[in-house]
Image: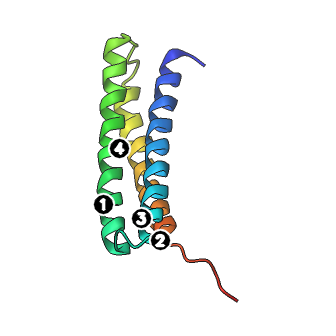
């Protein structure tokens, strides 16, 4: 794995880690009735969008600071093809986790 791939994966892991931590935090707040479920899901969605933007900016800063080769523009294709859909998937999964109710038989 070269440095460029490492930077891509670290940015993705940053995005996933922040989203998972927020989902767990908001789920606890909903269960303790500190936040309503709707409010928690809305805040979580906007935070995930912010984390996706943060991850993209971190990726661009890392490439500039580490002077990684741009090759054929891989950095400009990896952001819309990988990071942004990852953010969408994390939003959907987190909203499910926040509103999760265990099945009662």
Residue drawn at point x = 55 percent, y = 77 percent: 101
Label 3 vs label 4, nearer the camera: 3
Residue drawn at point x = 36 percent, y = 51 percent: 48
Residue drawn at point x = 41 percent, y = 18 percent: 71
| Residue annotated with mark 1 | 43
**Mark sitting earlier along the chain (1/2):** 2
At mark 1, the secondary structure is: helix
| Residue annotated with mark 4 | 52
Q: Is residue 37 left or right of residue 6?
A: left
| Residue annotated with mark 2 | 31
On residue 80, which mark appears? Answer: none
How packed mark 3 is, by other alpha carbons closer than 10 Å (few <14, some 14-19, many 20 or more), is some
Q: Position of residue 34 (x, y in %)?
A: 36, 69
Above-or-below relation of 43 to 80: below
Q: Nearer the viewer, residue 79 or 27?
A: 27
| Residue annotated with mark 3 | 29
**Mark sitting earlier along the chain (2/4):** 2
**Mark sitting earlier along the chain (3/1):** 3
**Mark sitting earlier along the chain (3/4):** 3
Contact? badges 1 and 2 (CB < 8 Å): no
Q: Position of residue 52 (x, y in %)?
A: 35, 44
């Amino acid at each position: 794995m070269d440095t460029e791939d490492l930077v891509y994966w670290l940015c993705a892991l940053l995005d996933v880690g922040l989203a998972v931590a927020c989902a767990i935090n908001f789920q606890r707040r909903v269960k303790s009735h500190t936040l309503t479920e709707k409010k928690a899901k809305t805040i979580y969605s906007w935070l995930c969008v912010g984390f996706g933007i943060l991850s993209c900016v971190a990726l661009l800063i890392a490439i500039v600071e580490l002077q990684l080769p741009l090759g054929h523009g891989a950095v400009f294709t990896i952001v819309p093809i990988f990071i942004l859909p990852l953010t969408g998937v994390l939003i959907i999964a987190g909203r499910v986790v926040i509103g999760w109710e265990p099945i009662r038989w």
